[in-house]
Image (spheres, rainbow, N blue to C red):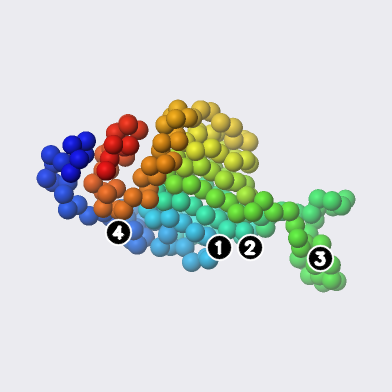
Amino acid sequence: MNASDPTASDPTAQGQTAPDPTNVHPMAGQPRVVLLKPLIDNPLIEVGEYTYYDDPEFAGEFETRNVLHHYGPDKLVIGKFCALATGVTFIMNGANHRMNGVSTYPFPIMGGDWARHMDLVQDLPSRGDTVVGNDVWFGGNVTVMPGVRIGHGAIVSTGAVVTRDVPDYAIVGGNPATEIKRRFSAEDIEKLVRIAWWDWPIEKITRHVRVISDGSVAELEAVE
């Protein structure tokens, strides 16, 4: 064990086990908190382990209530260890309407003779997949627009409407969301992305939870 390892002198830290990533309800007595990976069935939604959603009423309905207009082929990809508060909503590309004519109304999908013009609702504008990095914290009632990419370690403030990409370890807020500040220096952000602690073996993460949660970048970098 490396001398910089805080578990080296703590025998209780040896042999620890991580929480079960397949347990939909990881917190006993708190059905409002769900791990999303074991809950999601839609092949167009990919969620990493330990990412959770907190909702007092509809936690188990994230796939249908919080991911809207998702008709494909674009995907929603959310990384590991993300925290999503109540009301976080992802708007997918299926919400787009034609804008090159006089009206934006989607006549063909209403049926009748209008359905003969289905070409009018095909090949609509698309910004591609929506991708969220790892260790991202979303405040309540955040809205993420189609095709946005949110970097690792970002924080999205309550009520924000994210219309464009968010850099790694940035804090954003407002409507439209704008950058408030970076959580670390450019040099430290580069180190954190390179370290990518979220990709460590779960046993290693478990041993070093305190360093990940409360340590400095230098201390995290020293972990072996």
Mark 3 vs mark 4, CA separation in Å: 47 Å
Rendered residue at 37%/53% (across/down) = 50
Secondary structure at badge 2 equals: loop
- Tell me, yes or no, whether the two marked residues, 2 and 1, touch with CB atoms within 8 Å: yes
x and y, in percent, of residue 27 in the image: 31, 53
Which badge, 3 or 2, is on the more N-terminal residue?
2
Nearest the viewer among 215 and 187 is: 187
Give the amino acid at mark 4.
Answer: Asp
Tell which residue pokes out farthest to the right in this image: 102
Give the amino acid at mark 3.
Answer: Asp
Mark 3 vs mark 2, CA separation in Å: 17 Å
Give the amino acid at mark 2.
Answer: Pro
213 lies above or below 99: above
For mark 4, does the 10 Å Cα neighbourhood hold few (<14), some (14 to 19), or many (20 or more) residues?
Answer: few
Secondary structure at badge 3 equals: helix
Which residue, given by chain and number where applicable, does mark 2 sit on?
73
Which badge, 3 or 4, is on the more N-terminal residue?
4
Q: In which quarter of the image is residue 66?
A: bottom right
Rendered residue at 29%/48% (across/down) = 205
Mark 2 vs mark 4, CA separation in Å: 31 Å
